Image: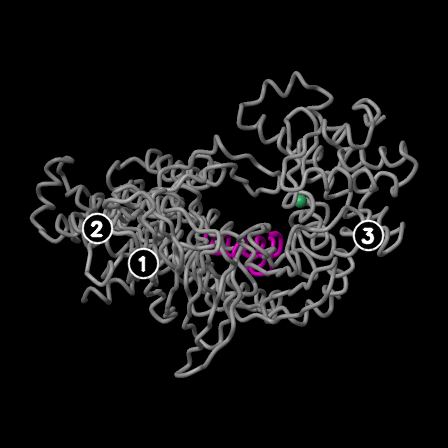
Amino acid sequence: MNAFEKLSREIERMLRDRLILLFIALTSVGAVWFCLNTSGRTASDAYILEPAKNSAILGALLFSVLTLAQFHRDYKNHTDAIILTCTDSIFYQLRRTLALICTAVVTAWIVTLFAFPFALAKTGVYFQPGSFAASWYLIFLGALIFSILLSAGFYLLFRRVEAAFVAVVCLIVLSKLLESQSALNPSFLLFWVQTNADCFSDLVSNQFQIDLILWNRLFCFLVSLSIWLMGLWGSRRYGRGVFSSFVSNARRAWIPVLLIAATVLSYGSFAAEPYFDHSVPRDYSAAYSSGTGIVVSSGGDEVGNPSLLLTNKSVKADIDTAVRCLSGEASYTLRNTSGGAQTLPVLLNSGYTVGSIQVNGASAQAVRDPAEKEGNATWRINLPNASEYAVVIRYAGKVGNDGSLSQKPVYGICNEYVDLPATGFSPKTDVSVADDCGFSGTLSLDERLEPVFTRANGVKGKTANGKTQWQFASEPGNDRTGLDAAVYDTTTFKAGGLNVEFKYFTKQKAAIADMGTIAIMKDAIDYFTNAFGPLLYQDHLTVLEIPAYFSGGGAFGNISAMDETSFAVAGYLPDGAGDPDSGGGIDVLVHELAHQWWGLATYPMADGKSYWSAEGITCYSTYCFMKDYFGADYANSHFVSEWQKNLKSYRNAFYIQNPTYLKKLSPGDQSNVLAALNNIGLYDIMPLQFVKAEKALGGSGALQKRLSGLYLKHLGQPITYDDFLAAVGLAKEALDLA
Ligand SMILES: [Zn+2]
C-alpha cells in the first residue's frame, strides 16, 4: 500500500467516524446560525464577513477538541503501543493530521452549500466573490486548519491532552481579546482565528483588507506549522523517552530542516509585513477630539527648514493599478531666504523610494532618515549655496500605512479603488510655502476610474491605451494634494448658497434614487444653513462617498466625506442597536450632514462632567429637520420617544440603581458598562435636554436663533458646555431632566 492509499484510507475512516461527523455537523450548524443572526454595517459585513469570523472562533474551538480526541484516542485505548510498533509513527502522525485537514475542507464545502446562496440572496447586486472567498476560505477554513496543526503539535509535544487543550483555548481566547485592545494597537498578524478584517464595503473592492488577511494567513500558517513540526520531531518512539525520541527522529533530516525553514520564514513574514510602517506613536498632547471621532490638531506648523521657501510645484504621476504602484516626477522651485548651503527635507510616504534627483541641472543624492513619522519617511537633500533652486525628484513605490495609528489599511491602490494621502501622491518639501505658491500637474490613471483631488480641481484630458490623463491645479498656497479614485456618479445641485457636487459609487445608483437622497441632502443643507449659518466652504462643496471601513466621515478642503452606510437604504443592525452614527438610512444621512455644523465647522467639546459633545446637538438638529421635513409624528416616533425609551433604560440600569456594585466589577467591565451608559448620555439624554431648553425658551425657533449665535461666534473653534449655556441663557439646573 503506498502513502497515498494509506492517506485516503485514513480519510475514509475519519469520514465514517461518528464523533467526527458530529463535529462537522456542529460546526456547520453553528455557521448557519451565525449567518442568520449576525449584524453588521453593510450587507457584505452582516451576511458574509461577520458570520465567517464568528464561525471561525466556534470552528477553531470544535476542531481543537476533535483533533485532541483523535490523537488521544489510541493512547487512551492503549492501542498506541501496537500501532507504533508496526507502523512508522512519524508518517502515522502526518497522515492523521492531513486527514483531519481534509475533514476541515469538507466542512468548509458543506458550509458553502448554505453560506453561498445565502450571501448571494442577501447581498444581491453588492455580492463580491473576492470578499466571500476571503471570509469563508481564508478566515474560516484557515482557522480550522491552524487549530488542527496547533492542537496536534501541542499534543505531540506535551503528551497530555489537558495541557494541549488549555494551550489552544488560551490562544483562541487571546485572538478574540485582541479586538478590545485597540489602545495597545496589536499587530494584525496576531489575530490568528478571526483576523482583524472589519466592515467590508458593499460598493468597492475590499482588496486592501484582503491583502492583510492573506498576509495574516501566511504568517499564522508558518507559525502553526512550526509548532506542529516541533511536535512531530518530539513525537515518542516506542519505548523511548522525550530526549531519545528527539535524537532518534532527527535522523530524518527533513524534519529539523523543515522546522528551521518554517520558523525562519514565520519570523521573516512577521518582520517583512509590507502594509504598515514603523512610525513613532503620535503625540496627542497638542490635539483635541472634536467629538466626531475626528481628531483636530492645533498648532504644529513648524517646518523642517524655514530658510527655504517653496514658490512653485508641479507633478507628473502615473498610477499602475495592475502592479498597484505609483511612479512620478515632481519639480520644485525654491528660494533660499538666508543664504549659504541648505538641506532640503522632503516628506514621502514610507512605502516609496526616491530615485534620481536633480538640483539646478546637476544630479544629487537623497539620504533617508531611519525614523518614520505619521506614515512618512524624511529624505534629506544637500543643496549648494544659491539663491534659487530648481529641484526634480523621481519617486515610486507601493503606498504604505501609518503603523502607529491602527492596524487597519486606509491607503492603497487596487483596480477598483485608489486612496492616496498627499505624501503618497507627491513628495512634500518640509519648508515654508509661499502664499501664492502654485501646484499643478498631470495624473495618468485607468480610464474607468475618476480621481477626486483634495484641495485641487481635476480636469479630464486625453485617453489613450486605456489610460486617461487628468490635469489638476490646486488652490494657491497649497502643496498638499492627495486623491481618491473610483467609479463614481456625480450629481450637482445648489444648496445653502453652495454648488454642491455629490460623488457616489456607481454601484449604489439605484439605492440613492430610491431613497430620494439628493432631495433630502439639498433640503437638509438649506435648512441647517438657514437655522445656524453658512458653512465655511468657498463657493462649492463636494460630498464624497467613501467605503464603509472608514466608519464615519470627515472634511478636508472643500470635500466632505461620508462613509457608504450614510447612503444605504436600510441599516443591517438589528432594531434598537447601535447609535445614530451607524446603521444606515435617512436618519444617519441627515445626522452626518448636521455634523458639518457641529463637529466639523465648530468643535463642541466633551468635558467628562456633562453629556455635552458634538453628538447631542447634532441629534437635536437632525430631529428639528425631520420635524420640518416629515412632520411631528415622524420626529416624535423616530427621535423623542427613542430618547425617552433609552433614558428609561438608563435609569433602570442595574448599575445606576446600585452604583456600589459597579465598583466590584473588573476595571475592563466597569469601562464597558460606563461606555454604554455614556453613549445614552451623549445620544439620548443630551438631546432631551435640548427639548427641555426649547420649552423653557418658548419654542424651537427661539432656541435655534441662540444656537445660530453660538455657531457663528465659534466658527473653527471649540465650544464648551459653558459656552452653550451662556448662549442659550439657561442655568445648568434648568436643563436637568425630571
Ligand atoms: Zn454623530
Question: Is residue 119 rendered to the left or right of residue 401?
Answer: right
Question: Which x, y percent locates residue 98?
Answer: 29, 57
Residue type marked 1: Ala
**Residue that badge 2 annotates:** 384
- Name the residue at the left extreme: 251
Q: Is residue 104 visible?
A: no
Question: Is residue 267 rendered to the left or right of residue 43?
Answer: left
**Residue that badge 3 annotates:** 626
**Does the magenta portion include 23?**
yes
Question: Which x, y percent locates residue 537?
Answer: 64, 54
Give the label on residue 243, or none: none
**Residue that badge 1 annotates:** 99
Span shown in magenta? 21-50
CA gap between label 2 and label 1 equals: 69 Å
Note whether 277 is above or below 8 in the view shown: above
How packed is label 1: few (under 14 Cα within 10 Å), some, or many (20 or more)?
many
Confirm or reject: label 1 Cβ below 8 Å from ligand 1: no
- Name the residue at the top extreme: 660
Task: Tell me the mark number nearer the camera, choosing from 3 and 2.
Answer: 2
Task: State the residue at coordinates (66%, 52%).
Answer: 583
Note whether 714 is above or below 610 in the view shown: below
